[in-house]
Image: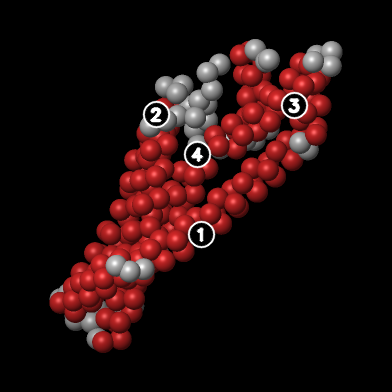
Amino acid sequence: MLTPTQLTAISQHLKKSGIIYEEVHHELLDHFANAVDAQITNKITFENALLDVSRQFGGPVGLKYIQTTQSQAMNRQYRQRLRHYFSVCVQWPNVLQTLAVVWLLYTLIDLAPNMMTVAYSLMVVAAIPFLVMLTLTGKHLWQFFRRERQLAWSLDGFTLLSKSLSTAMMFVYPNLFVYLGMMTPKNTAMNSVEQGIYFVMSCFIAFLCFAQVNLIVSYSKSTDKPLSHSF
């Protein structure tokens, strides 16, 4: 059984090797601890056992590769979750609520006085998941500074933060085109083609916000339970 000091040494070794996400850190910490403990029982010193186990994982390069692989897996999981929420939206009886939202979006766009109103409204809605994630990331960092967490970043949280930022930025550039007059002048009514384009964009952003908010709610529960080993 490793001592708290030895576990801390393994944790520091992982951090120096470039492991920055707490989920990856804790998983590797468990693997390292078991492997090092097994070698110590064979009359090998802790320092030599730690170096040997690190070599078995490929050293810093191998550990960073594991972290990259985990990050890619998290991105795939994110896409799978989006497909899951899409299937939820089109299943009975949820499809009735989905159709009601679609009809509401169509009506609001049809009643909008000009393109700028729609563009700014979409940008505000698209920014909501990012602003919420920014707040949760701040909470996570605060827990890190209070030593309730060993690492400042969560792989799940960082993935959601980057995806929600991408969603928000998706509507910044169209708004710039509108504002600069490269599309319909900002104070004039939209034509039918532009209404159709913004209607599709509105449906897309509504779905992304619905899915991301649900994912953020799940992530927020983890911020109340810091992944911190007691050593």
Rendered position, 108 above or below 190: above
Tell me the amino acid under the disc marked 1: Gln
Q: Which residue is mark 3?
A: 35
At x 50% / y 60%, what residue is drawn?
79
Q: Decide which of 187, 119 is in the foreground and name it.
A: 119
**Number of marks drawn:** 4
Q: Residues within 10 Å of mark 3 (few under 14, many from 20)?
A: some
Rendered position, 90 above or below 2: below
Give coordinates of residue 191: x percent, y percent. 24, 86
Residue at disc 3, secondary structure: helix
Horizontally, is 191 left or right of 153 in the view?
Answer: left
At x 73% / y 36%, what residue is drawn?
60
Q: Residues within 10 Å of mark 2 (few under 14, many from 20)?
A: some
Q: CA distance from mark 2 to mark 4?
A: 13 Å
At x 40% / y 50%, what residue is drawn?
215
Instruction: Please give the label number shown on residue 154.
Output: 4
Tell me the amino acid under the disc marked 3: Ala
Rendered position, 223 above or below 76: above
Residue at disc 2, secondary structure: helix
Asked if disc 4 and disc 1 are in contact, CB closer than 8 Å, the reply is no
Horizontally, is 155 left or right of 223 in the view?
Answer: right
Q: Which residue is mark 2?
A: 142
Q: Which residue is mark 1?
A: 80
Q: CA distance from mark 1 to mark 2?
A: 30 Å
